[in-house]
Amino acid sequence: MKKVIQVLSLLCLMVPISTWAQEVEVDIKAFMYGPRELKIAPGTKVTWVNDDQVPHTVAETHKVFRSGALDTNERFSYVFDTPGVYEYFCALHPQMIGKITVSAN
Ligand SMILES: [Cu+2]
């Protein structure tokens, strides 16, 4: 019985790790998203942080998500639940582009 409880509690610890607390940060610096391309699992929360001294935005090409202007140190988050490829850019500097691939494997 003790063994079963140990195994069960171990499972409880292990299962959430794969589905829980997946967060990634993308830094916006020197007019670039870093990393510019990202592969993540569904359910991952991505937070963009503006490290530049000028405002930037994060705008998905098909308007899946769109931040307002982010001033220095401001952040914008989006949780990617649906697998797919998401390309985004800065509405103020359209040469700034980034890509996020959401895939279960
Ligand atoms: Cu910008």
Image: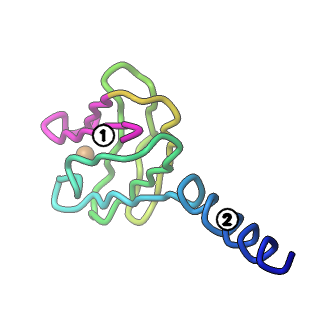
- Residue 62, placed above or below residue 22: above
Which residue is most to the bottom? Answer: 2
Residue beneath the point at 53% across and 56% down: 18
Please give the residue where the numbered disc 2 appears in the rendered image.
11
Q: Is residue 94 left or right of residue 81?
A: left
Question: What is the quadrant of the N terminus in the image?
Answer: bottom right
Mark toward the viewer: 1 or 2: 2
Q: Amino acid at mark 2?
A: Leu
Q: Which residues are drawn in magenta?
A: 85-105
Q: Quadrant of residue 11?
A: bottom right
Q: Secondary structure at mark 1?
A: strand
Q: Position of residue 95 (x, y in %)?
A: 12, 37
> Farthest residue in the left direction?
95
Q: How many numbered discs sit on the rendered protein?
A: 2
Determine which of the numbered discs, if any, sits on residue 100 in the image. 1
Q: Which residue corresponds to the image point at 48% horizontal and 40% vertical from the top-left?
A: 42
Q: How far from the left and from the top, in percent, is residue 3?
A: 77, 78
Using the image, tell me which numbered label, if any, was put on residue 38.
Answer: none
In the depicted view, which residue is nearer to us: 48 or 38?
38
| Quadrant of the drawing holding the C terminus | top left
